[in-house]
Amino acid sequence: MTIVKHELRQGKTALLIWTAAIAFLLMICIFLYPEMRGEMDEVGDLFSSMGGFTAAFGMDRLNFGTLIGYYSVECGNILGLGGAFFASLAGVSILAKEEKEKTAEFLLTHPVSRARVVTEKLAALAIQITAMNLILLALSLLSIQLIGERLPLKEVLLLHGAFYLLQLELAGICFGLSAFLRRGSVGIGIGLAAMMYFLNLIANLTDQARFLKYLTPFGYCEGADILEKGRLNTGFCLTGILFACAGIAAAYWQYVRKDIA
Amino acid sequence: MNAIQTEDLTKYYGKTRGIDHIHLTVRQGDFFGFIGPNGAGKSTTIRTLLGLIRPDHGTAQIFGRDAVRQRAEILARVGYLPAEVSFYPGMRVRDILKLSAGLRGRDCRKTSGRLCERLQLDTSRRAEELSFGNRKKVAIVCALQHDPDLLLFDEPTSGLDPLMQKEFFEILRERNKAGATIFLSSHILSEIQHHCTCAAMIKNGTLIAEGSVAGLLGTKTRRVSIRGTVDCSSLPGVKDLHRTPESTDFLYSGSQKDLLRTLLRGDVWDITITEPDLEEVFLHYYEREDL
């Protein structure tokens, strides 16, 4: 538990800043909704007639006239991208930073097995992501209450659940990469998250690219699909969980063998 | 059982040599000096002993346990001071000491308090505000506060002022008397000479000499450099003789009187007589003859 506590303390500032930034943008979006609703009919027409762009964001199938339709695109992008960046960054640096900042010699010359280091760091990562998502969910629900909208609880929970899973998946993959890296981890984390995001946009554009939805966690976070079906796509989710597990397994495999620079 | 025992220990970083077939034995209770120039493989050896890196070949045992497979058991009994000290950003000294004790599952406050007092370390400061020497002190306390049986110190005195060095070696001597084995690396001859009972010399990744310090350094060997013309080749005790028409340079372990008499017979403009560096002693008086 010592390493978990230590990691949480070390990561506290970053977690607070990311959570505050995402929460701020999320809440602004929600508070803007009452004003936007009046114009939504027009905007909706506009949004649904932008061809490929419309399809890329799934806006051809969403009703902007409802809060949840609006929320799933606007807030989905904020929570989706923001959460993905945070989870990737946290995951990709949590093991690699020890060598980058030369603290590995300190940590790993204590009588703690490498496997325990990996386990405790993984636990700290999961705790941070979970804490962030709980705070964001609570603030989101509260904001919806504050603007006096009916609470589409099931849909909001499904959306947030999907993004939570997305963050865990990206964190898991990045955690695996982290065990192999010594430097430059930040760029790889951001790059991976951004690449996943764009893969989903491409997958939305054409049916030939639809298989990409299996690769990117944004595939199962598509607001239009979730609201239409009322559930997450099991196939995409399971593939995602598989990727995350592979990342975590790779982290254990590599870190117990690794020469510490 | 030996404190440290390595057999054929070999580590290459890609094609670059780290250490090559190191056979090293450190008995329990030894105050052992590990000498070598920069890049000779001192740190690689120590890091392999700690299980930070895996040997390509050969084995390392500490207190009879394998450095790769029984890492955690070994580390519970070892205190390590790295050559370059780095800590987590934003942490205060006392939090670092507490973290280190926590990772060992021990409460070390009593010992750490005493050590901080002796080393004059302010535990309320943040580690990154500290000077290099003071950061080193934090690492020294981390390495000593759990009363380890083996101290592995990599160039421990760099950055410490002379008073602190004195206090530091005083602490080491006390620990050694109390039964702890001490293994420290250094490239400073006098440090090893004054404090260690045994020593090994490493060069280009290979051990070139090993033995008791008294035995290794107890000679009156001097390096003599002369400008002028004098023939010293027949003088007993001359080694490693280099001559040019205007200068003569050699290691000398014979009688001082004989040397002075010989010098008087020649034409000497300038002369320097210095203690040879350790490497020369090892190379010319021990490796080639005794070992």
Image: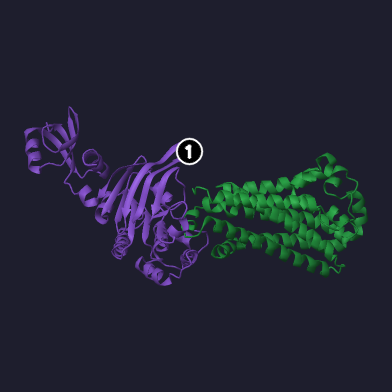
Chain colours: A green, B purple
Q: Dot 1 falls on which chain?
A: B
Residue B12 picture quarter = top left
Residue A65 picture quarter = bottom right
Q: Position of residue A242 (x, y in %)?
A: 71, 51
Residue B27 picture quarter = bottom left
Residue A185 versus residue B245 in the image, above or below? below
**SS at badge 1:** loop
Pick the residue in front: A94 or A243. Answer: A243
Instruction: Identify the residue position indicated by label 1 in the image.
Output: B14
Total count of labels: 1
In the image, taking residue A41 as reference, residue A231 lies left or right, namely: left
Q: Is residue B24 visible?
A: yes
> Which quadrant holds the C terminus of chain B?
top left
Badge 1: few (under 14), some or many (20 or more) residues near its Cα, within 10 Å? few
Q: Position of residue A12 (x, y in %)?
A: 61, 63
Residue at the location (25% across, 52% down)?
A: B193
Q: Position of residue B16 (x, y in %)?
A: 44, 37
> Which quadrant holds the N terminus of chain B?
bottom left
| Residue at the far bottom in the pictured view | B110
Q: Is residue A206 visible?
A: no
In the image, taking residue B70 as reference, residue B214 lies left or right, namely: left
Pick the residue in front: B15 or B88. Answer: B15
Residue A146 versus residue A84 in the image, above or below? below
Residue at the location (17% across, 27% down)?
A: B245
Amino acid identity at mark 1: Gly
In the image, taking residue B106 as reference, residue B248 lies left or right, namely: left
Q: Position of residue A158 (x, y in %)?
A: 80, 60
Pick the residue in front: A107 or B248. Answer: A107
Residue at the location (83% across, 69% down)?
A: A145
